[in-house]
Structure formats: C-alpha cells, structure tokens
Image (tube, coloured by chain):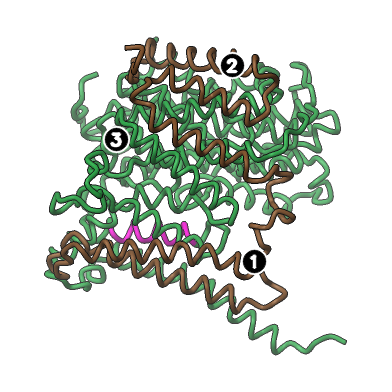
Amino acid sequence: MAEGILPSRNFGLGGEIMEGLLHGFAVVLTPQNLIFALAGCFLGTLVGVLPGIGPIGSMALLLGATYGLPTETALIMFAGIYYGAMYGGSTTSILVNIPGESSSVVTAIDGHQMALNGRGGAALCIAALGSFVAGTIGLILLTALAPPLADIAVKFGPPEYFAIAVFGLVVLSQLSGEGFVKSAIMVVLGLIVATVGLDGMTGLPRFTFGNLNLQTGIDFIPMCMGLYGITEVILAAEQKIVENKEIIKVRLRDLIPTRNEAKRSAGPTFRASFLGFFTGLIPGPAAVISSFTSYVIEKKISKHPEEFGKGAPEGVAGPESANNAAAVGAFVPLLSLGIPFAPPTALLLSAMMIHGITPGPLLIENHPDIFWGVIASMYIGNIMLLVLNLPMVGMFVRLLSTPANLLMPIILVLCIIGAFAVNNTVTDIIIMVLAGMAGYIFRKVEYPIAPLLLAIVIGPTLEDSLKRSLMISSGSFKVFWSRPISKTLFIITFLVVVVPLLLKLFKKIYNKEKPVAL
Amino acid sequence: MTKLKQILLVPISIAIIGIIYLYEAFKMPFGQVNAPDRSFMPVIYGFVLLGFCLVQILTEIFRPEGKKEKSILSEEEAVDGETTGPKKPIILIISLLIYCIFFNKLGFIVATIPLVFVALRVMEYRSWKASLIVAIIVTLVTYFVFVEWLKVYFPAGILG
C-alpha cells in the first residue's frame, strides 16, 4: 500500500473521518488481510481462554507470529489478537469460574451462577453480544475522537509530552491496587531499565557495561515475555498438579437468551459501553476498573439488586461490555498521542515500532493505511469474534482440559521465539529469563508489574521531553506552568496524589473524634 | 526470619539496586539544568527510587500491628494455592540460563529439545518417553511454523 497523505477534499472533519474509514476498509478488505484478521481473532481468543495468561501475555506470546508479515497485515492481525484475547477471558469465567483475565473477575460472579442455573449458554451469548455492541460503540467514539485529538496533539511541544508522561505514570501508580508507594517504586524501576542503552541526546552509551547488544536498549518485548510468560511458567512449575475443574457443557441451542434476559441486558450494555470507553482513556488498568464500576452501578440502579451474585444477566452484560469498550478506548491515546496508557497498548506500540511505524499525531497523515486500516479491521474483527465465539465456544472451552504441564512448556518455547525474533540476539533471551525471575519474585511479594512495563515504554518520552523542555527554557521549570495544557495536567496529577491522602487523613481524624460505642 | 524482616527485604533489596545504579550514574557527566547530560535523569531516578524505598520501609515499620501485611514469603501463607517449594522453579531457571549459553552454539532445534524435555519433567508430564516425544514434536512444529512459514531467523548451530 502506498503511504502518504490522503487526498483532502475539504468535506470538514466528519467527511474526512468517513473518507479515512472507507480507505481503511479498502485496506482491510483484501483476502490476505481478512485471513490474518480472522487468524488474529481466533488465536487471541484461543490463548485468551487460557487462565493466568490474559491479554498481555497472549499478545506477547503471539507477537512473534506477526514478524514476517507486511506492516498493515501484521498490525491488523495483532489488533485481532488484542480484542480476541479480551473476548476469550469471559468464556472461562462463565463456564469454569476461572477468569481468563482480571477484567473478567466480575463476570464470573453472576456468569458462573447463570451457568450453574442452566443458563450458561445465555450468559455466553449476553457476554458476546454485549462485547460486540460495546466494541462497536467504542469504535465509533474512537473513530470520532482520535483524529481531532491527533490534530490538537500536533501542536504539542516537549512540556506537554512531559506532562502527559508524568500524568500517565502517576495515575497508573495510584490505580494499580497494590498501594501507591509500591507502584511508584515499580514505575521508577521501569524508568531505570529504560535508561539502559544510548542516551537520546548525546548518543553515548549508558549502563551497557561494554555489551554492544545493550546499546539499543532493553527491549520491551523480552521484558514483557519474561514478566508475563516466563513468570507464569515458573509459577506453574511450582504449583501442585491439580485435576482439571469440571467444565459446564453448552449446546448451540442453549445460547439464545430469553426475552426477559435480553431486555435486562440491553440497558447495562449501552451504559457500560460509554462508561468503559471513557475509562479506557485514563491511564491504568481501565478494563478492570470499568468492569467493577459497571457492576456496582448496575447493582445500585437495578430493580432486582437481590439477584446480583445469584445469576443476574445485568451482572454479565455490564462488566463484559465495559471491559471491551475500555479496550477500544485505550487506543485513543496510542493512536493520537503515541503514548500508551496500558500494557496491552504498549505492546501494540512495540509491534508498530518493530515494523518501523512510530505512532503519534502524525500517524494519521504519514501512515493512513495503518491508522485507518487498524480501525477498520477492528469493526470487521468485532463481527468475526461474534461469529467465532458463539458457535465455537465448545472448542475454546475444550482447550481448558489441556493439562497445564503440557501447555506451559509450549508457552516457554513461544516466549523464547518471541524474544529472540525481535533483534535476533541471545541477549534478549537472557533479558527475558532475568525478567521472568524478577516477575516471579514481584508476584510473590505482591509488587505490581504493569507500572514497571509501562514505565519502560514511556521512559524515553519522559526523559527526552524533560531535557528538551529545560533546554528550550534555558533551565527554567516555569516552562511547565506557562503553557495551559501542561499546567492543567500537572494540577490534575497533583490532585491525583494529594486528594486520596487528604481523604485518608480526614477519615482518620473523623474516626478519632467519633465516640466509641459501648 | 521474622515477618517484618521478610517484608522489609524487598524495599531494602530494591534500595541496594538503587545505590548501585546511582554509583554507576555518578561515573557519567551530569551536565547542567539548561544542558542536561547523560546522567541527569539516572541521578534523579536513583534518588527518587531511594526516597520511595525509604517511605515503604518506614510505612512497614510503623504500620499498626493489626494492619501488618501478610508475610508472602512464608510457605504456610502462600497466596497462589498449594506449592511444591522452590526446587522446581530453580531447576527451570537454571535450565533456561544454560539454554542461553548454548543457544547460539547448538542452534534452536538441538538446544530447545532438552529444554522442553526438562520443563515437561519438572512439571511431571506423564512418562520420560512421552516427555521426550512431546519435546521433539513441539520443537520441530514451532521451528517449521516460525522459520519455514513465517520466515523468522534462528541460529542453525551444529545442524547448519
């Protein structure tokens, strides 16, 4: 496909978006791209079904499969792997009560209860349809929001990028769930890893200890393979072999929900689509947060709150729709700013970089085939997933009966291939093994891994933009206050840190003043 | 080791990494605020890391007795279900490190078959014979998919 700026016909922003989207469909609707989009959705779902690996691990494992493909095809396939893995998680939650990924934890509450009540098929259908509707609504919002945001981002200078990077990392630390300080430690560790290699400004090596392979820096992919894939393999080696859990069987005719179930699922799906999408724009584990928030909201406003936890369809439709919409929302900062706010989109960024594409505000202008091709492929992938997931659910579930002691050595080989293929050097395998060891320890001591991974990706942007800002301003930090966007972002970042601390303090004082009940 | 000591082990270890990192960073030029050099950010990161580690250490020391974090290092309180101890993970990690050393010399196929075999045995997969057959099949299938079909390069080693 030829790269270049799409012919501008001055139809206004809406017209440009439509034109771009049609161009994207023209890119995707070739036999090769369609086959690889389908392969991506299939592989993503297949690996996403496996408990413990989750979307990030699945994506890292399958990244190696895209190396030999043309750029658009590789990214279309990889995007398919991403949302395929997001879809896959719900199946195990509902039928086996084992969430395939953290964002499906809430789905397991009511989904599995529905399955125990003989409504497993309906729960799967509600989850798949909810994911489809939410994914499509999310895509419409992404199509509408990403181009104008990219237009604004073209005007961003180093201070704005520094503010965005700081904002992303601080919010991520605050939301990671293991405590702010622990997450902050992991963020700084990630930033430290990102300093290995050639210095961006001087071009001289740092922390390479004479190793030429380290001069290109520590790659994100081997780190990801290690922290997710190898860690999982090591943890599995440590676990006692247990018998497989009983899997509830679902027949094709059981998939159709009753009229009442469909009616009760419609509202939550619609509400969660918007909630999920906008949560996806925030740095951090948006898919998890949005699914929990949706569950709480639906329980609060439901006419049958007593049914929650006992098999309420709203408890499946809301969280599943929310996490899929959040997955789409996370594409906005990646495609328009070039900054990933979550590990899965960081992996997508790496996939783009491997194929020589630098995401950011100029992506839409310089690589319209990629930008619109990926977005269009997601519309098609959403339909493919619906068609794949429902009739083939039995096959995906059967995968769960594959013994872990056979599966994990296969995952080990896939990790090795994925890590080695990035730069064709054994140094990356060593980095992966060391990252795996570190990940194993961090998992044991409950230090979150996501902030570390994200900091490795955002680190170079953070460093480069801070240094450039200081050089522009002759060393004055006022540059961050004199520009409205960076000033606003710093104020929000400050509030994100201070408000929870103040709330904690007030709660403590209030509890002290409260007389103790005798 | 007491529970508190175990919990403090992590931030202290990370702080030691921070000190070594700072030591290496100080060997490089820092520059000035208006012209930052190579160690400008590493020095900042090093001190910030030490600061956070200190806060974590103090938090753990002064945490009220009732709210003490569970010791995650002790086996009886393991969070990830029933475990068989550290022997198997250590065998796997050592195998992986040996694999890294011989990967280029032996090539993908010759080096990977024993690694997968060890992994299968560590995870108690059926019999020795079945493990060997699976190890050979897994290695050959992945080799043909990635090298022959997807054109990913691998060192041929002694087979080349």
Q: Is residue A50 above or below residue B107?
A: below
Q: Which residue is mark 1?
A: B1
Q: Which chain is brown?
A: B
- Image quarter where the N terminus of chain A lies is top left
Nearer the camera: disc 2 or disc 3 = 2
B116 sits left or right of B43 in the view: right
x and y percentages locating residue A441 in the rendered image: 54, 51
Task: Please state the extent of the stretch shown in magenta in the rendering.
Answer: A162-173
At label 2, counting other C-alpha atoms closer than 10 Å, the crowd grade (few under 14, some 14-19, many 20 or more) is: some
Residue A483 in which image quadrant: bottom left
Q: Which residue is mark 3?
A: A353
At label 3, counting other C-alpha atoms closer than 10 Å, the crowd grade (few under 14, some 14-19, many 20 or more) is: few
A399 sits left or right of A347 in the view: right
Dot 3: what SS?
helix
Which amino acid is tagged 3? Met
Residue A518 in which image quadrant: bottom right
Q: How many marks?
A: 3
Asked whether B62 falls inside the magenta stretch, the response is: no
x and y percentages locating residue B100 in the rendered image: 40, 32
Q: Earlier in the sequence, mark 1 or mark 2?
A: 1
Q: Chain of mark 2?
A: B
Q: CA distance from mark 2 to mark 3?
A: 38 Å
